[in-house]
Image: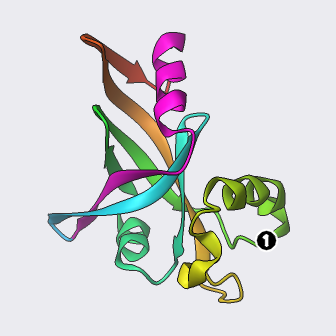
């Protein structure tokens, strides 16, 4: 895997960033903008288990991401509640990454339907300063 491309992805998305997240709703694509954080081949979003995106991903976990001269495919999965002990150390990082808005009433960790969406990337295309990087995350 190209380490330069991975460094560029981390530089661009290894903080609170807005990305477009596409899912499949029946036979139609559905896209929305979400706050996300990239780390080690995956994007993370704190969201709601009963949202349309999570319902769509339960039926078909294939997802696509786009933002800042970057497109990718991946597999979306609910990795559990923010207060789940298995998520404790990672959630400490996400709360810090999303500090600008996390506690403004948008996220309710007391709600059992609050969850963490992980989109594990399978492949991507990144453009940087005239160079095209094609990345296979399954390598």
Front in this rendered view, residue 106 or 85? 106
Report whether 12 appears left or right of 73.
right
Residue at the extreme front: 100
Q: Residue at x 35, y 30 (%)?
A: 124
Total tally of numbered discs in the picture: 1
Res 117 → quadrant: bottom right
Q: Nearer the viewer, residue 135 or 93?
A: 93
Q: Residue 125 location in percent, x, y?
A: 31, 26
Q: Is residue 139 visible?
A: no
Q: Is residue 10 left or right of residue 27?
A: right
Secondary element at image label 1: loop
Q: Is residue 105 visible?
A: yes
Which residue is depicted at the point 54% across and 20% down? 7
What segment carries the magenta color? Answer: 3-25
**In the image, is residue 5 part of the stretch drawn in magenta?**
yes
Residue 62 vertical position relative to residue 66 in the rendered view, above or below? below
Q: Quadrant of residue 23?
A: bottom left
Colour option used: rainbow
Q: Which residue is located at x 82 percent, y 62 percent?
A: 88
Q: Residue furthest toward the bottom?
A: 111
Q: Position of residue 20 (x, y in %)?
A: 31, 53
The answer to if 72 sits in the magenta stretch is: no
Q: Assess disc 1: are there few (<14), some (14-19) or many (≥20) residues with their C-alpha within 10 Å of its C-alpha.
A: few
Residue 98 image offset from top left, x and y in percent: 60, 59
Q: Relative to 94, is 5 above or below? A: above
* Residue 28 appears left or right of 11: left
> Can you identify the residue that label 1 sits on?
84
The residue at 31%/48% (across/down) is 64
Residue 95 in percent (x, y) is at 70, 62
């Amino acid at each position: 895997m190209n380490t330069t491309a991975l460094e560029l992805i981390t530089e661009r998305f290894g903080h609170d960033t807005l990305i477009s997240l596409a899912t499949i709703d029946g036979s139609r694509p559905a896209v929305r903008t979400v706050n996300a954080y990239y780390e080690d081949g995956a994007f993370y979003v704190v969201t709601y288990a009963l949202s349309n995106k999570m319902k769509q991903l339960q039926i078909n976990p294939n997802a696509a991401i786009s933002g800042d001269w970057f497109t990718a495919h991946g597999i979306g999965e609910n990795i559990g509640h923010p207060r789940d002990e298995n998520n404790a150390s990672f959630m400490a990082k996400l709360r810090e990454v999303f500090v600008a808005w996390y506690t403004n009433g948008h996220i309710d960790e007391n709600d059992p339907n609050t969850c963490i969406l992980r989109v594990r990337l399978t492949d991507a295309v990144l453009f940087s300063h005239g160079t095209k990087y094609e990345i296979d995350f399954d390598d």
